[in-house]
Amino acid sequence: MSESINREALKKLSYGLYIVSSILDGKKNGQLANTVFQVTSEPPQVAISLSKNNLTHEYVEKSGIFSVSILSESTPFAFIGLFGFRSGRVIDKFEKTGHKFGISGCPIVIENAVSAIEARVVKKIDNGSHTLFIGEIINAEIFGNDRAMTYSFYQENLKGKTPKDSPTFIPLME
Ligand SMILES: Cc1cc2nc3c(=O)[nH]c(=O)nc-3n(C[C@H](O)[C@H](O)[C@H](O)COP(=O)(O)O)c2cc1C
């Protein structure tokens, strides 16, 4: 079956680039994610796909709340590296990152963000390596007028790679 799956075809899917954040026992954490999308309009709901290996997964699972910060095109690669290639298990990513707390108590990254959403988990789907969390949006706000970063902009202009915990990671050997 798998030889009929041309991974180049999957690369044609479009995404944005986001920081998904949560909090547990007063400890903040966040991670880069490209798999975020709105699933319904009424009520407004958003889905995120998080690797079970990630600390953010544990925080979202246990707290039931998360925020999504939509990154600007001008986000520097160092910022993406901090949230996308390092784990909160070894570094406090919020120590030097501009943020605030939302109405749910969830941290919201405002540095390099054009807007943000805050959501409460209403459903979880176990997809093996990743969990799809569906959240009902409880708050959303705009921070600026910069263009939001797309995944293709990241790949073309920042020559960005995708690590294995991303749902859209492409294995070299199949
Ligand atoms: C471009 C890019 C996109 C990513 N997208 C996702 C994603 O959608 N879901 C996911 O679970 N991890 C994704 N990751 C990987 C996480 O950001 C990474 O594993 C992070 O270090 C996890 O941090 P944590 O352990 O502090 O939660 C992505 C990474 C990059 C660089």
Image: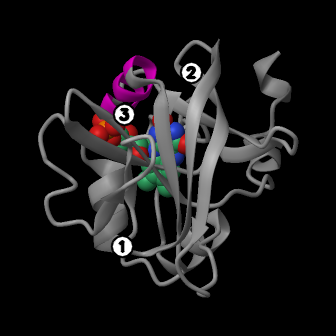
Q: Position of residue 48 (x, y in %)?
A: 61, 37
x 17%, y 34%: residue: 89
- Between 28 and 53, the residue placed more toward the observer is 28
Residue 142 visible to the viewer: yes
- Between 158 and 109, the residue placed more toward the observer is 109
Q: Which mark is residue 133?
A: none
Mark 1, residue position: 111
Above or below, comparing residue 58 to residue 77 in the picture: above
Q: Quadrant of the N terminus?
A: top right
Distance, label 1 to label 2, CA atoms, is 27 Å
Label 3 is placed on what type of residue? Thr
x 52%, y 77%: residue: 143
Above or below, comparing residue 150 to residue 60 in the picture: below
Mark 2, residue position: 131
Residue 53: name its quadrant: top left
Residue 42: name its quadrant: top right
Distance, label 2 to label 3, CA atoms, is 11 Å
Element at label 2: strand
The stretch of residues the image draws in magenta is 55-62
